[in-house]
Amino acid sequence: MNDPGRSVESLLADLAVHIEWPEPSAPRFELSLAKPRQETPRRRSWIPVTAALAVLVALLLVLSPEARKAVADLLGVAGIEIDFVPELEDPVGAGLDLGRQVSLDEAVEMIDFPVSIPDWPGDPDSVYLSGSRVNMAWAGGERLPASGDTGVGLLYSQFHGDGVDARFVKSLGPESSVIPAVVAGRNGFWIEGDPHVISIEDASGRRVEETLRLAGNVLMWETDEVTHRLETMLGLDEAIRIAESMRPAHDR
Amino acid sequence: MSVEGRPLIEQDLIQRARDGDVAAFEELVRMHQAIALRVAVLVVGDRSDAEDVTQEAFVKAYHALGRFRQDSPFRPWLLRIVRNEALNQRRRLGRQDRLGLRLASDRLSGDAAPSPETVVVAGADRESVLAAVNGLPDRYRQVVALRYLLGLSEAETAETLGIPAGTVKSRTARALSRLEVALSGVIEEVGHE
């Protein structure tokens, strides 16, 4: 082969035509409310997509929540399952002044230090860039209690820093306490009790004000020239587990 | 369907759907459901999960139509919603980030990307190609899957992944380069067929 790159492309083209792609259930797209429910416990056919849209949009705007539920039940009997999504939700963390929303790939591309993500809860729901700082937000859920009315369960920030140490934490909100913590052998600290603003003097004597967004707890630690901060409603042990599961986002 | 421009009929359908014409949106669903399902399968793997994801994504897309910029291509805008929904689903399910693909046992699918050249590839080698693609870091794997397995253009891939077109270009080059190394044995074999 004179052109190996072209050979790779031809192998990929061959692969593409041998993939077992699922096909949608089209063309069965007619809206048929009379159609009996099919015994497919998990899989929804394509009929619901369009049927749900047709009926949903017609009825959503004029019915009360109770009536909407009744309509959903009725349509369920007719073989249609509807998930009500009244509005496209704002991105997780919107309104917390976290910066410009970007994709995770964009963040990895644009930031000059290795961006990390935790094994759990996995890829963030939203990523924001504020200068050279990366902020990631995860929606609250069963294992990730959400903070107040923000809906955010975990906020993870990464930025250049000169070291964090509990001794340098100068001020906290009322009722807050700070204790030293170690994350994967690295220095850090844990603040619990709803801190509002923390003021830190880094190793070079520079004073850093950190505004807290969630009324929760904070774990901060450092790796090579990068300061990491988790804000969460979880406890110290769980926060450390998340912190120690960090891996480079570009390898995900 | 053109890549950069949209057929007039699609523009008309989008406008009608924005004005509340559900039948018009149904037609858009019909036009894009196959590729949307494939994008979802690439991320979540399981077909029924992918169907759920695609359904959710279509409903979200309908409600987000008001924010769609009419001078931009519709398909990648939609596929980005599908992919984001699929990523969320994958995270909820705690799945691995491998391509959820398997090879057809003995049939050829005629509607995939056309081969730029005819090659004879043994089944075992094809498995190797799939394994090599799966072995790529995610940022390369996704680009390769969208560009070569789904036949999206560079611009569509960029929009779907939410990254600059230049990044798609550089990642494609690096991915092909890695695959070339990983598949050197297969390339050699094919070259002598």
Image (cartoon, helix red, strand yellow):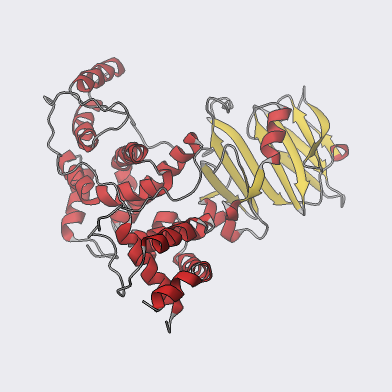
Residue B83 lies, in percent from the top left, at 40, 47
Q: Residue sitting at 38 percent across and 41 percent down? A: B46
Q: Residue sitting at 52 percent across and 30 percent down? A: A151
Q: Is residue A59 left or right of residue B43?
A: left
Q: Is residue A9 left or right of residue A111?
A: left
As rendered, which of A48 and B137 lies closer to the eye?
Answer: B137
Which picture quadrant has residue A229? top right
Q: Residue sitting at 25 percent across and 58 percent down? A: B108
**Number of disc labels:** 0
Is any atom of residue A79 visible in this view?
A: yes
B129 lies above or below A141: below
Residue A170 lies, in percent from the top left, at 84, 36
Residue A30 lies, in percent from the top left, at 12, 37
As rendered, which of A192 and B96 lies closer to the eye?
Answer: B96
As rendered, which of A248 and B69 lies closer to the eye?
Answer: A248
A85 lies above or below A98: above
